[in-house]
């Protein structure tokens, strides 16, 4: 492996490259699914509920209250979903 320009002159350049090579070869469970649940699910849920509330609340409440109410509902639904996911994960981990 050719050292980078920034690594030239560094006495640890070859060791450093080996360390990063070993890190890349570590075997372990994939965290992709967990990352999607932890980061993408709340954002997608909040956005989807906010869009649905915007459609649903039009004409149902005064226009002045549509956005704040949609925000509160989306926040509550997202928090409830993440609480539910957290409980399911804890229960699944207890069973192992």
Image (cartoon, rainbow, N blue to C red):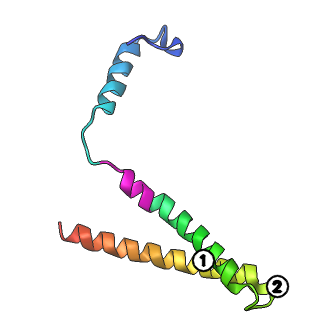
Answer with the quarter of the image where residue 53 lies: bottom right
Mark 1 nearby-residue class (10 Å; few <14, some 14–19, many ≥20): many
Disc 2 crowd, CA 10 A, few/some/many (<14, 14-19, 20+)? few
Tell me the distance, in whole angstroms, between the alpha carbons under discs 1 and 2: 17 Å
Task: Please give the name of the residue rendered at 36% of the width and 27% of the height, measured from the top-left corner.
Answer: 20
Does 16 sit left or right of 9 as displayed? left
Label 2: state its secondary structure: helix
Asked if residue 14 is positioned above or below residue 19 in the image, the reply reads: above
The stretch drawn in magenta includes residue 25? no
- Tell me which numbered mark, 1 or 2, is placed earlier along the sequence: 2
* Residue span colored magenta: 30-37
Q: Quadrant of residue 71?
A: bottom right
Residue 4 in the figure: left or right of residue 54: left
Q: Residue sitting at 76 percent across and 89 percent down? A: 59
Q: In this rendering, does residue 12 appear at all? A: no
- Quadrant assignment, res 16: top left
Give the quarter of the figure containing the C terminus.
Answer: bottom left
Could you say which is closer to the camera, residue 9 or residue 54?
A: 54
Residue occupying the far top of the picture: 9
Kindly tell me whether residue 58 is visible in this rendering. Answer: yes
Q: Could you tell me which quadrant the N terminus lies in?
A: top left
Please report the residue visible at 46 percent of the width from the left and 12 percent of the height from the top: 10
Give the image location of residue 85, x and y in percent. Answer: 39, 72
- Residue depicted at x 43% and y 76%: 83
Give SS at disc 1.
helix
In the image: residue 27, left or right of residue 52: left
Majority secondary structure of magenta residues: helix
The residue lying toward the viewer, choosing from 19 and 66, is 66
- Residue 5: x percent and y percent? 53, 12
The residue that mark 1 highlights is: 74
Q: Which residue is mark 2?
A: 64
């Amino acid at each position: 492996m050719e050292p980078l320009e920034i690594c030239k002159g560094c006495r640890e350049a070859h060791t450093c490259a080996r360390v990063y090579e070993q890190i890349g070869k570590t075997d372990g469970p994939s965290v992709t699914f967990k990352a999607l649940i932890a980061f993408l699910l709340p954002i997608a849920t909040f956005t989807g509920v906010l869009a649905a509330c915007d459609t649903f609340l039009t004409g149902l409440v005064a226009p002045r209250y549509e956005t704040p109410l949609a925000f509160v509902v989306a926040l509550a639904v997202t928090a409830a979903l993440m609480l539910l996911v957290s409980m399911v994960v804890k229960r699944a981990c207890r069973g192992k």
